[in-house]
Image (cartoon, helix red, strand yellow):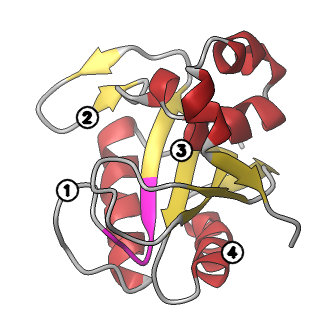
């Protein structure tokens, strides 16, 4: 894909058959670029609001021609198409699509922070990312052990 960018997308769901929600979202990402790698699926304890079901998470590396803000808009549109209804921050959701990294860009504005501001604190994003990009292995090792212990590989 000429003039493309490498974006890493974190996916999560804890409502309405989360495994199926994540799989559907992975397939739907083809509408915004070319999927190059997909992690396995992981079960994680909720982050933020702890009184909700566990999440199913994965990470996808893809190539896209979309610039960062356009990609963010496309991901929000995909979430809506896949049935996400706006709700509380860090609350239950049918699907969540977050840009974790975009090329090697470091960027902050009112709508977007790259890399994702919590990437290096959240095992549910960092562990699957390290699975498809070994350069993140040291960051996984540096995670708080309690954070790592809240993540379980699921065989599906």
**Earlier sequence position, callout 3 versus callout 1:** 3
Q: Where is residue 57 in the image (x, y as percent from the top left)?
A: 61, 57
Q: Residue 23 carries which label?
A: 4
Looking at the image, residue 14 sits to the left or right of residue 118; the answer is: right
Element under label 4?
A: helix
Looking at the image, residue 27 sits to the left or right of residue 131; the answer is: left
> Magenta includes 82?
no
Q: Is residue 7 in sight in this rendering?
A: no
The residue identified by callout 3 is: 65
**Earlier sequence position, callout 2 versus callout 3:** 3
Could you tell me which quadrant the N terminus lies in? top right
Q: Is residue 79 in sight in this rendering?
A: yes
Give the spatial CA distance, label 1 vs label 4: 23 Å
Element under label 1?
A: loop
Instruction: Please report the residue visible at 27 percent of the width from the left and 56 percent of the height from the top.
Output: 49
User: Residue 152 versus residue 146: which sits nearer the camera?
Assistant: 146
Q: Which mark is residue 13?
A: none
Q: Where is residue 135 in the image (x, y as percent from the top left)?
A: 76, 15
**Earlier sequence position, callout 1 versus callout 2:** 1
Q: Which mark is residue 112?
A: 2
């Amino acid at each position: 894909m000429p003039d493309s960018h490498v974006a890493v997308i974190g996916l999560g769901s804890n409502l309405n058959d989360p495994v199926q929600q994540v799989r559907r979202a992975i397939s739907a990402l083809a509408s915004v670029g070319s999927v190059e790698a997909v992690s396995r699926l992981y079960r994680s304890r909720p982050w933020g609001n702890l009184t909700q079901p566990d999440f199913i998470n994965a990470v996808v590396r893809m190539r896209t021609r979309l610039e960062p803000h356009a990609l963010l808009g496309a991901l929000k549109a995909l979430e809506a198409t896949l049935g996400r209804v706006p709700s509380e921050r860090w609350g239950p959701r049918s699907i969540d699509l977050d840009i974790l990294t975009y090329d090697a860009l470091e960027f902050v504005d009112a709508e977007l922070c790259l890399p994702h501001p919590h990437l290096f604190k959240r095992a549910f994003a960092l562990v699957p990312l390290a699975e498809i990009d070994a350069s993140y292995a040291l960051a996984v090792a540096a995670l708080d052990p309690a954070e790592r212990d809240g993540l379980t590989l699921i065989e599906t």
